[in-house]
Image (cartoon, coloured by chain):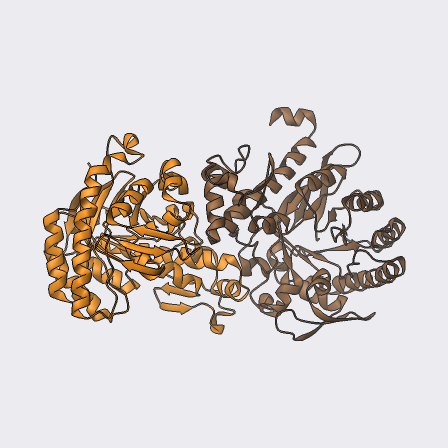
Chain colours: A brown, B orange
Amino acid sequence: MSLTFKILSGSNPGGRRARLDLPHQVVETPVFMPVGTAGSVKAVAQDVLESLGAQIILGNTYHLYLRPGHEAIRRMRGLHRFISWPRAMLTDSGGFQVFSLSQLRKVTDDGVQFRSHLDGSSHTFTPEHSIDVQIALGADIAMAFDECTEYPADRNRAEESLRLTMAWARRSLEHFKKHRESVVWRDEFEGRTQSLFGIVQGGMYGDLRRQCAERLVEMDFDGYAIGGLSVGEPRELTLEMIAEVLPLLPKDKPRYVMGVGYPDEIDLYARMGVDMMDCVLPTRAARHALLFTSEGRLNIKNKQFAEDQSPPDPACQCPVCRRYSRAYLRHLMQAGEPLAATLNSTHNLAYYLGIMQRVRASFEPPAQRDQS
Amino acid sequence: MSLTFKILSGSNPGGRRARLDLPHQVVETPVFMPVGTAGSVKAVAQDVLESLGAQIILGNTYHLYLRPGHEAIRRMRGLHRFISWPRAMLTDSGGFQVFSLSQLRKVTDDGVQFRSHLDGSSHTFTPEHSIDVQIALGADIAMAFDECTEYPADRNRAEESLRLTMAWARRSLEHFKKHRESVVWRDEFEGRTQSLFGIVQGGMYGDLRRQCAERLVEMDFDGYAIGGLSVGEPRELTLEMIAEVLPLLPKDKPRYVMGVGYPDEIDLYARMGVDMMDCVLPTRAARHALLFTSEGRLNIKNKQFAEDQSPPDPACQCPVCRRYSRAYLRHLMQAGEPLAATLNSTHNLAYYLGIMQRVRASFEPPAQRDQS
């Protein structure tokens, strides 16, 4: 068994509350997943993530493959142990980073040759290799190796990209089925294994998106992601593509929109029936002084906060808002103190996780809500 | 009332355990004080410092005067509130930083003209101004404005520097006595005020050190510091200067050696009768991958730790050693993750605070130790 997904309650037209049972954690969905690119959610310690209620975090296959290396992580009994994170994890396939970070890419039907952004060394990722790396890392959920279609892309380019993604999805799944039993922690979890999700691509072409979704569903993955969004397109297009794809995905499996988004987006998509989302935005924005609050976005470096002793977000109960003032957070940014990134990121993650908590609560049947 | 200092037990020749009662915190001494230069112990959040048992931390008058400004901090009701640190604080006088960081210094009998290292703006610190700034900051303990004698300094230079330091000490004390009632939190603490410590200088000349100590003791400060050490001199000289001065300081007042040192040094000086010490070393070394452990110093970037799954210090019970491995800390440094500074600093501070805890325990009378 890899995962079970039990829908607890829902709303119209498609939002639902569910329980995603993964080997390392039972995850309440809809869920926002903080991103721990290189094995750390930047500037936030694992115990802080736990106290904020993070149930599942991401790791990045491309980064961890290059450093410290997947074989080293396998020898240390997997990514969970390596980073001391006992709850659930998901690794992306490395596809997106190969395309966005590496140099001198050469794409063939077989896979992608690229040079490391760290030292220029030469590497090849094929679907099989991506899966091997992800099994070595041992996250609860692995992703099929895909080609992320850039934006804008003309129809020919989008079709060609989609052809690769679908061929690679099949190879990813076949290889995964053959080797899933070899994950290093299997015996600790009564023989359970990782799960594999397929990724719907197709650029901004609704018919390509639908075609991709239908093919992937035929292949029968454990869950389905919508990728290639938030790559520079207007938000209406993001929404349109999600709306095109969601109805085609099986209702009884988790649906994951990759790399989104702003607070109002994750709220909206969850209410449309998206179960999982991840984004670097809360932590990246935090490092650049941008706080998300119930009063809107604050650039905490702004001079108006120099002596503002109110909490960053007066409606927030996170450890940062309970203890520190806007004036102090501004000062930390101005002074270049490393604590600025930690406190800003902690608040932003709390804010994102809080949105999902409220969405989940809103999906509960009224009777249940009265009891709680 | 400013402070009370009650000796609880002692050892021979001069180490002692005492209770230093300050407005914001009763501090058990000997104590190590983490340094929060610009209002933050670099990369370590206040709740983590509390959980490590930090009783008192330092703030830096020069840095906080330049940014965000002492008047802003006064308006926000003092440094404790501004940084959300309810326990004790000490501010140094700014003397050391004016000499080590600022540009184009001009020293006269009146004080020091200098240019900010941040923006080149021109400022003057006199003893009176340093005290005004420190009263605005409102730390539990303020320090007399001194000139830190550089190393090496010839006898003429050391004598001239000492003359200034002693004249400035007297002016600091007089100004402090006139204005101590104006500290912003006085009414919250039953009329208690800050305390002022004098600083013994004199370069590496034992007779100048003794002369300075005797004059300062005549002035009757609330406590006494030994400054101008750890400025590049060999460790034997540091020890010699401390040994020269300690016997001349009143037994019933706290004695503080500024800016030291390595773990074995703070242990040694505490056993010689030093009650308070501060140093950036545990946090600065941490940011450069140097960990202090019961097994000696580790450069955690070292390749030998790449797959070392043991805790940073197997004998340490700090939150970092209980959760993370050497391999993970090495990876965080290699990957340039901000969490590296946080975890390394947390461990090093725990190690320093643990040394002082053991020294204090060793000073307890045997009967009391049996009960505990």
Q: Residue at x 38, y 48 (%)?
A: B64
| Towards the viewer: B329 or B150 | B150
Which is nearer the eye, A205 or A290?
A290
On screen, residue A95 versus residue B11, left or right, reads right
Q: Give the quarter of the figure containing the N terminus of chain B.
A: top left
Image coordinates of residue A85 in percent, x first then y, are 55, 54
- Residue A184 at x, y percent in the picture: 62, 63
Is A365 placed left or right of B80 in the picture?
right
**Foreground residue among A359 and A367:** A359
Q: Is residue B359 shown left or right of residue A84?
A: left
User: In this orientation, which residue lies closer to the viewer: B251 or A46?
Assistant: B251
Q: For this view, does A61 lie left or right of residue B15?
A: right
Residue B44's x, y, as percent? Answer: 43, 52
Can you see residue B239? yes
Q: Position of residue A14 (x, y in %)?
A: 78, 36
- Number of marks present in the image shown: 0
Asked where in the image residue A244 lies, by quadrant, the reply is: top right
Query: Residue placed at 53% from the left, 63% from the top?
Result: B336
Q: Is A189 drawn above or below residue A244 in the view shown?
A: below
Residue B28, placed above or below residue A137: above
Name the residue located 54 percent from the left edge and 43 percent from the top edge. A302
Q: Determine if residue B204 is in view.
A: no
Q: Residue B298: which quarter of the image? A: bottom left
